[in-house]
Image: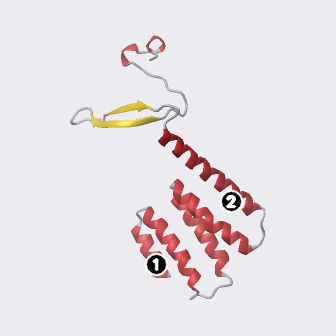
Amino acid sequence: MIDERSAIPQEKDMLFTMHTAFWINEISLMHENSRLWEVQLTLTNDDDPQLAALTQCIQREIVAEKLYMELLKNTSHDSDRVLIYDQLPCVKKKQGAYTEAVSYIKTSLKINRRPLPEDHPDLAAFCNNIDQVYQNMIDYSKALAVLNRC
């Protein structure tokens, strides 16, 4: 509590440090016709196993993305670029960055489409990947449009 430093001590203000993490215990409407909600929180501790697992997962995704971007900068062969562009959407989907995932898939498709005929089976995999991302975004009309084009 920071009552002694607050402009309105009755409000019982609290100050949290950056990156403070909480578990949400309960969320309830404060008054029937109100837009205010009361959220009951529990502070996590430094040795929380679920928080540690989440942190490790995020760190791996960040490292993977940085590695793929570095590889992309240092390669000039389309065959290598396609392999990298095929992996980046996986990272972006896990991060919930679906628009970026679609962009990487489309880039890979543009590079890969040059040597492939229109009826090549590999093109179906690209369409399926884009379809899955749009389904994750709950944009079924775009997902259906992609499948119809394929």
Q: Secondary structure at mark 1?
A: helix
Say if 149 sits above or below 27 in the image: below
> Does label 2 or label 1 sit earlier along the sequence?
2
Per the rendering, the mark at residue 93 is none
The percent position of residue 85, horizontal first and vertical second, equals: 64, 67
Characterize the local packing of mark 2: few (<14), some (14-19) or many (20 or more) Cα atoms within 10 angstroms.
some
Per the rendering, the mark at residue 147 is 1
Q: Is residue 97 visible?
A: no
Q: Nearer the viewer, mark 2 or mark 1?
A: 2
The percent position of residue 108, horizontal first and vertical second, equals: 63, 72
Q: Is 78 positioned to the left or the right of 91 in the image?
A: right
Q: Is residue 74 visible?
A: yes
Extreme-left residue of the structure:
32
Q: Amino acid at mark 2?
A: Tyr
Say if 41 sits above or below 54 in the image: above
The percent position of residue 150, horizontal first and vertical second, equals: 50, 82
Q: Is 31 positioned to the left or the right of 14 in the image?
A: left
Say if 125 sits above or below 118 in the image: above
Say if 22 sits above or below 136 in the image: above
Question: Colour scheme in the image?
Answer: secondary structure
Q: Is 7 positioned to the left or the right of 117 in the image?
A: left
Characterize the local packing of mark 1: few (<14), some (14-19) or many (20 or more) Cα atoms within 10 angstroms.
few
Q: Amino acid at mark 1?
A: Leu
Q: Secondary structure at mark 2?
A: helix
Between 59 and 147, the residue placed more toward the observer is 59
Alpha carbons under labels 2 and 1: distance apart: 28 Å
Please give the name of the residue rendered at 68% of the width and 54% of the height, measured from the top-left corner: 66
Question: Which quarter of the rendering shows the N terminus?
Answer: top left
Please give the name of the residue rendered at 55% of the width and 66% of the height, measured from the top-left corner: 102
Per the rendering, the mark at residue 68 is 2
The percent position of residue 114, horizontal first and vertical second, equals: 67, 82
Q: Are marks 2 and 1 in contact (CB under 8 Å)?
A: no
